[in-house]
Image: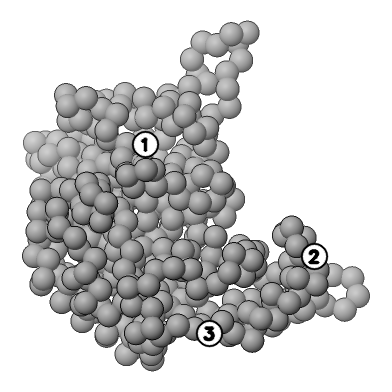
Amino acid sequence: MTPPTASAMKFDRSPLASDNERMILDIVRRHEPIARSTITGHTNLTQQSVHRLVETLMEGGFLRAGAPLKGTRGQPSPTIELVREAVYSVGVSINTDSATLCLADFACNVVAEEALEMVPSDRQATTAALLQTLESILKKHSIARERLLGLGFSMSGFFVSDNREFNAPEPLRDWSLIDLRPDLERAFGLPVWLENNGTTGAIGESLRGAGLWCSTFAYLSFNYGFGGGLILDGKPFHGFHGNAGEFSTIFTPDESLRRPALQYLIATLRDNGIDIHSINELQQRFEPSWPGVEAWLDRTMPQLDRLIATLTGVIDPQAIVFGGQLPQALGRMMIARAHMPSQRAHRYGVGSRDARLVLSEMQGDAAAIGAALLPLKLRYFL
């Protein structure tokens, strides 16, 4: 198994490692630094099989020997680590007022993340700017294009067809109801995976955030709109039509105006004299004491409480992660006000166990990072 070239895998989105190889790579990713002698204990394979797989992956340039583990009895244990520069993956996130490009290495580390200084309403202009940004990043970090694995593309909205056409918010009309994959593959010369921002945010969280301690969680993506993603037993759950995590569908049309979409908070703030023009500006400037914040929370929290109860009853998650473009201070206010199902009256005075409500542990644009990790997860990890 050798690192692929962009031309060789164009339009090919199949895994590039066997199931057992992907299992070994995922174990190393999750537990790095890991002693070579302990890898077998995380598998259902024999020690001989694991030894053979590790040797194959080392010969292919995907694993290498790391620094010995100290602090153990006897000789320090040899370790195995991922070869970070083996391949790289690109992620793009499109929101109503921002576009971000991320480059990740084989160990799922962010090499670079850049937000465009433009509103992405024009699809062709935005694509050209993203491509220019990518070429600049590759040059700056001396990364050969042949090392690129693929591109994960994420956007706000839901899917409406088998070829994953987006129905995106109104400001992204130019990106909506068309098959984006062929144009993106031609522009970037890479295989492209399409996903919505909520699911890529959840994938990013599963690989670099709460997923390191939690295998089943719901990810709430607070953006111009409101959605999210589901991670079940460490894997993203997409649903039959690819729209699992479209949490706003549980609200009636009247309730929808009171759902926790940040566009409504901005409107409330502007009505109260706070001059906010974008989600990014809200994220950077938010103050809990602003007039209108408490009123918006009073209107919004009943809908969020219902969603928390629904998720608890349907998937029984270990955690519910508050993410997307949510200001952290606002997230803390929402978590403090949430009413959990266990607080209701129950038989014998004992309710079921609640999910932990936590803020996203991701640094940077979670959707863009998750989009960059998507090709890595689908082709090399589990």
Query: Image quadrant of residue 335?
Result: top left
Which of disc 3 and disc 1 is earlier in sequence?
3
Q: In the image, what residue occupies the spot 58% across and 85% down?
A: 61
Q: Which residue is mark 1?
A: 333
Q: In the image, what residue occupies the spot 48% across and 68% down?
A: 15
What kind of element bears circle 3? loop
Query: Image quadrant of residue 137?
Result: bottom left
Indicate the amino acid at tag 3: Thr
Q: Which residue is mark 3?
A: 2
Residue 217 in the image: state x and y as whole percent: 49, 42
Question: In the image shown, does 331 or 245 lie closer to the viewer?
Answer: 245
| Cα distance in 3D space between marks 2 and 1 | 50 Å
Question: In the image shown, does 192 or 263 lie closer to the viewer?
Answer: 192
Position of 254 compared to 71: left or right? left
What kind of element bears circle 2? loop
Q: Judge whether 196 appears above or below 83 on screen.
A: above
